[in-house]
Amino acid sequence: MSKQKIVLKYPTHVVEEPVIYNLVKDFDLKVNILKADISPRKEGRMVVEIEGDQEKYLKAVDWLKEQGLGIFGLQQQIVWREDLCTECGSCSAFCPTGALEIQRPEMRVNFNESKCVACEHCLMVCPVRAIEAIKEET
Ligand code: SF4
Ligand code: SF4
């Protein structure tokens, strides 16, 4: 048995397909959706925890790639560039885990890497590109 946290990137043509249902039904995996940002006819992303037999998991990964999904392991590193950050606070509103948060009463932004699940929501909202992802595709 293995448990993996991964980020699934959905191209537009897959967004309305029952991908998670197929992972459960065809590969006998348990899928826990940690975060989803999926809209019709738009690229989307989902952070999931997948539990099950390792061999079935690897077959599921191959199937996901065949469907055109991007798969990134959460061992990828998110880097917060404090020197570029303007402390606008936008990222903290979108961070699902509190890894990026505003510390009170100073109202300073703080990045706690140990809480980060590499979902990349912060990358999309940062106006000055103070957050970078160093990716390692699985
Ligand atoms: S990638 Fe950004 S938004 Fe996602 S958990 Fe990490 S710090 Fe929060
Ligand atoms: S969105 Fe970017 S500039 Fe704003 S607080 Fe977050 S890292 Fe800093």
Image: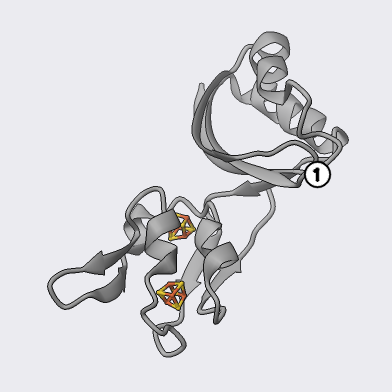
**Which quadrant of the structure image shows residue 48?**
top right
The answer, for residue 105, to whether it is visible in the render is yes
- On the image, the x and y values in percent for residue 35 come to 50, 39
Residue at the spot of label 1: 11
Q: Quick check: 61 left or right of 77?
A: right
**Which quadrant of the structure image shows residue 71?**
top right
Q: From this viewpoint, which residue is outermost toward the left? A: 105
- Image quarter for ligand 2 equals bottom left
Asked if residue 37 is positioned above or below residue 108 in the image, the reply reads above
Q: Quick check: 30 left or right of 110?
A: right
At 79% from the left and 32% from the top, the residue drawn is 62
| Disc 1 residue type (three-letter) | Pro
Asked if residue 5 is positioned above or below residue 26 in the image, the reply reads below
Q: Residues within 10 Å of mark 1 (few under 14, many from 20)?
A: some
Q: How is the image coloured?
A: one colour
Q: From this viewpoint, which residue is outermost toward the bottom? A: 83
- On the image, the x and y values in percent for residue 104 come to 16, 69
Q: Quick check: 106 left or right of 94?
A: left
At 55% from the left and 82% from the top, the residue drawn is 128
At 75% from the left and 36% from the top, the residue drawn is 40
At 43% from the left and 67% from the top, the residue drawn is 90
Residue in front for this viewpoint, 19 or 37: 37
The answer, for residue 8, to whether it is visible in the render is no
Asked if residue 124 is positioned above or below residue 81 in the image, the reply reads above
- On the image, the x and y values in percent for residue 85 come to 43, 83
Q: Quick check: 48 left or right of 89?
A: right
